[in-house]
Image (cartoon, rainbow, N blue to C red):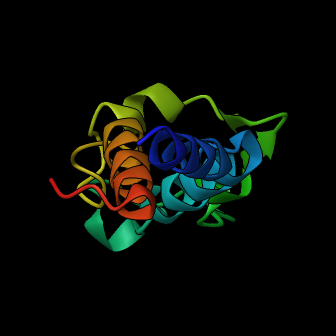
């Protein structure tokens, strides 16, 4: 029984590697980050508008996802119809599901 617990604990430690979990979270967060679509806007896009600033300005540094743009909180609060639940909550749920699947836990 103790050997089984040690094997399971080693699997947990391997699965919960910070860099791996951070990368899984970053990939999901960036996938969920909306890209500006002027066709969905009430007003016209500014001259020279280039969609994708939010995705371009999101980075992973020292296991921290950094959404470095002025309207990050607004998007995360569901402002965009492309991400009505924001990015943080679905990313956390994705990480949870990833860990559970790696550990063989069914939810």
Residue at image position (44%, 51%) is 99
Across and down, in percent, residue 55 comes to 63, 57
Residue 14 in the image: above or below residue 34: above
Q: Quadrant of residue 82?
A: bottom left
Across and down, in percent, residue 24 comes to 58, 57
Residue 55 in the image: above or below residue 4: below
Across and down, in percent, residue 77 comes to 30, 30
Q: Where's the N terminus, which quadrant?
A: top left
Residue at image position (27%, 55%) is 105
Q: Quadrant of residue 53?
A: bottom right
Across and down, in percent, residue 66 comes to 69, 34
The one of 43 and 27 positioned closer to us in this rendering: 27
Residue at image position (66%, 66%) is 50
Q: Residue furthest front?
A: 1
Residue 45 in the image: above or below residue 37: above
Is residue 19 rendered to the left or right of residue 91? right
Q: Residue furthest left?
A: 107
Residue at image position (47%, 62%) is 36
Is residue 41 rendered to the left or right of residue 76? left
The one of 1 and 12 positioned closer to us in this rendering: 1
């Amino acid at each position: 029984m103790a050997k089984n617990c040690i094997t399971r604990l080693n699997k947990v430690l391997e699965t919960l590697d910070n860099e791996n979990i951070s990368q899984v979270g970053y990939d999901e967060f960036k996938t969920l980050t909306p890209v500006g679509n002027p066709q969905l806007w009430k007003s016209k896009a500014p001259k020279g508008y280039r969609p994708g600033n939010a995705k371009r300005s999101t980075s992973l540094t020292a296991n921290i996802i950094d959404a470095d743009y002025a309207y990050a909180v607004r998007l995360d609060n569901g402002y965009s119809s492309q991400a009505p639940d924001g990015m943080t909550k679905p990313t956390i749920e994705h990480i949870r599901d990833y860990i559970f699947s790696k550990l063989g836990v069914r939810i």
